[in-house]
Image (cartoon, rainbow, N blue to C red):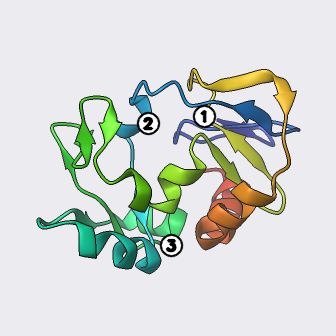
Amino acid sequence: MRVKGKVLSFGMEPVSALPGFSCRRCARCCKGKVVVLTDQDISRLKPHVKNEFFVKTSKLEKRLTGADYKILMVNGHCVFLDGNSCAVYDYRPDTCRRHPFLVTERYILVAKECPGIDWGRTQETDYYKELSKSIARNIERALEEGF
């Protein structure tokens, strides 16, 4: 990803307006991704999950997001992925709720490879900005530093 001439590698690109979105249930977002967890995410999920579902973030992931934990991946897939469906959809983490977007005060970032993006329409940023707030400052700093 390029921001002010710098490249980032977490698969999102800046855009000037938030495009529309309609999930295609392809489950690409559940494979090979880092799904960071807030304390609220863990509290929301714990009553509905019997097994361990999270691990500590790496130093770089912690620096980029501020999150201490992330979803456990098994064979490159989210531990909650069942076919192309989420086994805990109603309780899913904020990272999953906001995908394919990350909206901060200064940036609108889009996972452009997501087939559910509708480039023919736009939408307001408020919902996604609220879901992004736990990691927004860290992401903005990383963008400015050129991660």
Q: Which residue is mark 3?
A: 66
Upstream in sequence: badge 2 or badge 1:
2
Q: Specify the amino acid type for callout 2.
A: Cys
Q: Nearer the viewer, residue 40 or 31?
A: 40
**Is residue 6 in sight in this rendering?**
no
* Residue 45 sits above or below residue 98 on the image: below
Residue appearing at x 40%, y 62% in the figure = 91
Residue 50 x %, y %: 12, 67
- Few, some or many residues within 10 Å of mark 2 (<14, 14–19, 20+): some
What is the quadrant of the N terminus in the image?
top right
Which residue in the structure is indicated by mark 1?
Answer: 111
> Looking at the image, do the residues carrying marks 1 and 3 touch, with CB atoms under 8 Å apart?
no
For image coordinates 64% across by 62% down, the residue present is: 132
Q: Is residue 23 above or below residue 101?
A: above
Q: CA distance from mark 2 to mark 3?
A: 21 Å
Q: Is residue 125 left or right of residue 36?
A: right
Mark 1 → mark 3, Cα distance in angstroms: 20 Å
Location of mark 2 (residue)? 29
Residue 18, by quadrant, is top right
Q: How busy is the neighbourhood of tag 1: few (under 14 within 10 Å), some, or many (20 plus)? A: some
Tell me if mark 3 has few (under 14), some (14-19) or many (20+) residues whose alpha carbon lies within 10 angstroms of its own.
many
Hey, what amino acid is under mark 1? Ala
| Element under disc 3 | loop
- For badge 3, the amino acid type reads Gly
Whether the residues at callouts 2 and 1 have beta carbons within 8 Å, the answer is yes
Q: Quadrant of residue 81?
A: top left
| Sequence order check, earlier mark of 2 and 3 | 2
Per the image, label 2 sits on a secondary structure element best described as: helix
First reached walking from the N terminus: tag 1 or tag 3: 3
Of marks 2 and 1, the one in the foreground: 2
Q: Which residue lies most toward the left here?
A: 51
